[in-house]
Image (tube, rainbow, N blue to C red):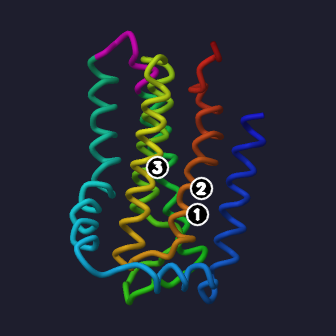
Amino acid sequence: MIIRVGASLVLLFVLLGVAVSGQPPTVDRFVAESVGGGPAVEVASVVTLVLGPILPAAAALALLIAALSVRARAGLFGRALVLLVVCRAVSLVKPLFERARPTDYPDFSFPSGHVVSVASVAFTASVLCAWLARERLRDVVLGSVLTVVVAAVCRVLLDVHWLTDVVGATLGVAGVGLLAARALRLLPPTA
């Protein structure tokens, strides 16, 4: 079941990327024209500094330190580090889609690297929580989802990504994350 869901999400990610690699669809243009400006952009520019590529780098360092210092859980933390890296690699496919951003920018748009970063940490944190503090899993998943949504909204508000870029990033990380977590034996047994 997990493999089917993960593969389906990856397929949706690829199909979305192909579908939007030309001109932006109506939904993207509508959202881009409807948002932006005002104090929300100033807040988004501060939030996006924290909720971006620095986040998985900090998480990777924390996982490495945990793997080296908590011997009883070194394998778990090491596999979680691999999961984080594999999820973060979703953004490496940008050249395959060659999608332009809403504003002039030298890098491709699909998928959003910032949202991939946040979703990668969120997914990895949720998997670790299922192993280490299962009673807190609902809270961690809810916090993770909210954090990914905040990062996505910020990228769209800043006019550096289309709506479909942030949706694609989320689909890609969720799909790749499920497949990688399964392959790494990181999905804990259900209660």
Q: Residues within 10 Å of mark 2 (few under 14, many from 20)?
A: many
Q: Name the image quarter holding residue 29.
A: bottom right
Percent coordinates x, y for residue 95 in the rendering:
54, 75
Quadrant in the picture for residue 16: bottom right
Q: Residue type at mark 2?
A: Gly
Q: Amino acid at mark 1?
A: Gly
Most foreground residue, 148 or 38: 38
Question: In this picture, which residue range is highlighted in magenta?
Answer: 70-77
Q: Residues within 10 Å of mark 1 (few under 14, many from 20)?
A: many
**In terms of sequence position, does the residue under pointer 3 or pointer 2 come before the other?**
3
Label 2 near label 3: C-beta < 8 Å? Answer: no
Helix, strand or loop at mark 3 = helix
Q: Which mark is residue 25?
A: none
Q: Amino acid at mark 3?
A: Ala
Closer to the camera, 170 or 41? 41
Residue matched to label 2: 172
Q: Position of residue 130 (x, y in %)?
A: 51, 23
Return the residue nearer the eye: 125 or 57. Answer: 125
- The residue shown at (39%, 77%) is 160
Query: Which element type, helix, strand or loop, lies under badge 1?
Result: helix
Image: 171 above or below 137 = below
- How far apart, in angstroms, are the residues tagged by discs 2 and 1? 6 Å
Horizontal and vertical percent position of residue 186:
56, 26
Q: What residue is at 38 percent from the left and 10 percent from the top?
A: 72
Q: Are marks 1 and 3 in contact (CB under 8 Å)?
A: no
Q: Which residue is mark 1?
A: 168
Q: Is residue 14 left or right of residue 1?
A: left
Indicate left or right for 183 with 70 as reference.
right
Residue 191 x/y as whole percent: 63, 12
Q: Are marks 2 and 1 in contact (CB under 8 Å)?
A: yes
Write the residue at 41% across / 43% down. 121
Label at residue 119? 3
